[in-house]
Amino acid sequence: MLNTHLLIATAGRANLLGRTLQSVADCRLPTSFTGVTVIENGPACGSQAICNRRYGDLSVRYMWCAVPNKSHALNVALSGMDESTFVIFSDDDIRFTPETLVAYEEAAKRRCVDRFYGGPFGCDYEVAPPTWMFPYMPLSAVGWNPTAAEFDPQVDRFLGFNWAAFCGDIVRLGGFDPNFGPGSPAGATGQESNMQRRMHAAGMSGELVPDAFVNHYVPRDRCSIDWTVERARRNGISRGLARRARPVTDIALSHWSNSVRLVTSTAAKWLTSPLPASKLHFTARYRQQKAIGYFTGFRTSSGEPSRHAA
């Protein structure tokens, strides 16, 4: 019998968490739905009080993990679940649409062997960014809604606030790697990307669930030039960390391409420095920080040695 559960990681954003839980309560709930677990990591910032509010008939369980690391917190929450549980992963800044949870349940009921699942999303902007910045911003700040023909189940991955998998599949692969995601020692992004990359390597494939649609809240400061440049650096760190486990030839090629990017972007940044607000200067900074992040991640000796293949 299928058991569907929603797992939300939160850290320091109790004001947004209440909005997310209310949107879940407004959903059509699956017959297999067993409730919501909210796990707060790092300093307690009022999330327990938010979880204790009444959200109709929605069952909300609060957990706290002292370690300020999202991957570690998710592993703690999963350790208390039956491995047959179908877990929908989300964040504290998401607005669910009414049919999202039911769409996930229907996908899980027709489960094929070795699948994980995910859905598209839009953005709730506090202040929308200029359109010219979209190609440089992460998908989380732009939105993603591919057609079935555009989605490659052997390659494409879902974002951490809108995907699902059976608990046992994640546990079998060693859980989430604490070296990736919020709170990671090196500041790397992408704990869900790392997990799904390992799922692909283990022979699993992703299944797009088009009706599992959510909206991601994007605050004003995450639409700025400085934030986008900093995010490029953090994404570069993730790529550098992941590349360490690749064959030597792949590492050499990545080092060469990132070295070229670093040299050319540093020169372009210097040449465009008289125009600090220009798109050219922004592009140079973006490419430079992405390359710097890559080498930082590759050289980083993380606080916790990774047990996971990237």
Image: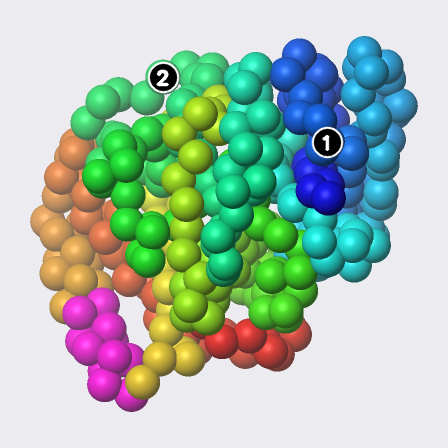
Quarter-of-image position of residue 273: top left
- The amino acid sitting under disc 1 is Phe
Quarter-of-image position of residue 76: bottom right
The N terminus - image quarter: top right
Residue highlighted by disc 2:
128
Q: Earlier in the sequence, mark 2 or mark 1?
A: 1
User: In the image, what residue occupies the spot 86% across and 17% down?
Assistant: 53
Residue highlighted by disc 1:
33
User: In the image, what residue occupies the spot 51% across and 38% down?
Assistant: 107
- Asked if residue 130 is positioned above or below residue 44 in the image, the reply reads above
| Residue 176 part of the magenta segment | no
User: In the image, what residue occupies the spot 13% across and 39% down?
Assistant: 280
Helix, strand or loop under label 2: loop
User: In the image, what residue occupies the spot 50% across and 24% down?
Assistant: 214
- Asked if residue 164 is positioned above or below residue 240 in the image, the reply reads above
| Residue 200: percent from left, percent from top | 41, 63
